[in-house]
Image (cartoon, rainbow, N blue to C red):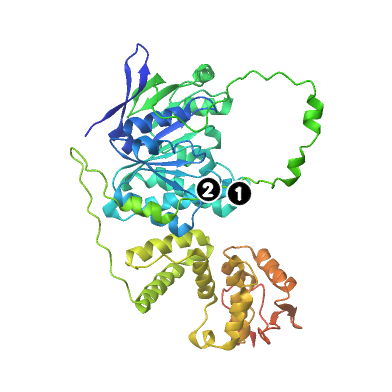
Amino acid sequence: MQVGIDMGTVAGGQPAKLDIEELLATRLLVQGNSGSGKSHLLRRLLEQSAPWVQQVIIDPEGDFVTLADKYGHIVVDGDRSDAELIGIATRIRQHRVSCVFTLEGLDIEQQMRAAGIFLNGLFDAEREYWYPVLVVVDEAQMFAPSVGGDVSEDARKLSLGAMTNLMCRGRKRGLAGVIATQRLAKLAKNVAAEASNFLMGRTFLDIDMARAADLLGMDRRQAEMFRDLKRGNFVALGPALSRRPLPIVIGAVETSARSSSPKLMPLPEAPQDVEDLIFTPDPEEFNRPILRRTPPAPRPTTDILAELSKASPAASGDDISIQRAPAQPEMPAAEREERLAAVLSEILEDPQAAYRTDSVLYQEFLVRARMRRVTGPPMAMGEFRRRVAVARAGVDEETASSENWQTALTLSLRVSEDLQGVFLLMAKAAIRNEPCPSDLRIAKAYGTHSARRARRLLGYFEEQGLVVVHTDFSGKRIVAFPDLEAETLPGDPNATDDVDLKTAAE
């Protein structure tokens, strides 16, 4: 079904039409400096297409939450646990509910992590729920940066991977990405390159004007025109818009953002005693509590689940109503644990699993658990990391049941979650009287190829008073655990094999 929505006017006053069905297959990139009218354009697109297609808006500043009042979008706060975000994203796809995913109040790293997890939840929905969804991402350069910034590498990879999935592989899953950015130069090229429709607004930097001209197939000498565009004026190109670059003026919107552009206001007349007014403290100030800005409290998950569980309004035309899936019976605890252990084993059997971040492995674990029809609440991220650390240590049943191993598990809580796998690997070697693992083996347990980093980890454990590292007369390394009253056999730290054989050490 072909639906053309009105985005505004072109030269001569003719309406500028955007083909929604074509947009779902070809995606859209919007670019313009701050104040060019990007948010106004996105709001016009969302308002005009709301009756025709499900929408999900990734909103870093909370500007689009006003859509909920008029168009019935669910507002989801990003300040939630990973499992909650994945569950909400799954049910949003299942029940075809439009939502605004607001990240207001979170710092940039938290925003990237929450957006990445939520987008992956949409992407990993089961095939039977692959209905068309318009996924709008404002300030996309934050979530798909071209270079690393001040955020952690894990957060950057998680967010960038989710955005890449949305733009590169989302079409077959019904996800149509609409991304808006202030700076094309700051947006990852593999994300921007997947869009076939473009709306380019006012731009001043030469590098951004050149990239905009390239995307529109224009001569670089014509790039200067982007500096002259007025607010709300864009140049459109793409199969859903126009086969040739076409200047359009974005039309009016029915809702408004909570924030707006600053307006000039006359200053009040200065009082005569202005210096006394400013520098003399009010006696009540000393009794007032110091207020710190805190992020808004998220809506309870139960409220959102209750709204999602409501029957969606009856669709008209060719839309097909979705019947709610019957609730699955509770699974016995023993069977549930057996399936979870099998899923974890499958993931860790992959040779590359050791070099993937815990967040990536956790996403794969949750997806496979759903495929195995594991019922009950999802495993928490902390418990997952703990199980991965124990599994990577390679402990057999006899060792796992020993008192020394229980002590080792308690000691491992004194280090951060990402180091527990390395600590337990060394503890297992000491308890079983095995050769000390090589630098490469320790590095693999930490998820890196750097032998130097492995040596630093042992130094850190020694600083914490957990181990004592020394060498024998042949230069082989021995790691002792005073609390376990055990130590490893001598092992070659420079061995290239992942597993040092006890016989070789002897």
The residue sitting at 24% across, 61% down in the picture is 326
Q: Which of marks 2 and 1 is nearer the N terminus?
A: 2
Tell me where residue 446 appears, x and y as whole percent.
59, 66
Q: What amino acid is found at the position of numbered circle 2 in the picture?
A: Met
Q: Is 489 or 329 nearer to us in this picture?
A: 329
The residue sitting at 44% across, 29% down in the picture is 256
Q: What amino acid is found at the position of numbered circle 1 in the picture?
A: Val
**237 displayed left or right of 182:** left
The residue sitting at 46% across, 69% down in the picture is 348
Tell me where residue 356 appears, x and y as whole percent.
51, 61
Tell me where residue 474 appears, x and y as whole percent.
74, 82
The quarter holding residue 72 reads top left
Q: Mark 2, residues whose alpha carbon is within 10 Å: few (<14), some, or many (≥20)?
A: many
**Which residue does the numbered mark 2 point to in the structure image?**
112
**Which residue does the numbered mark 1 point to in the structure image?**
151
Task: For the N terminus, give its image quadrant.
Answer: top left
Task: Tell me the element at label 1.
Answer: loop
Q: Is 449 or 129 nearer to us in this picture?
A: 129
**210 displayed left or right of 253:** right
The residue sitting at 46% across, 53% down in the picture is 117
**Are circles 2 and 1 on residues that touch, CB within 8 Å?**
yes
Task: For the C terminus, give its image quadrant.
Answer: bottom right
The quarter holding residue 261 reads top right
Q: Is 506 or 362 nearer to us in this picture?
A: 362
Task: Tell me the element at label 2.
Answer: helix
Q: Is residue 152 visible?
A: yes
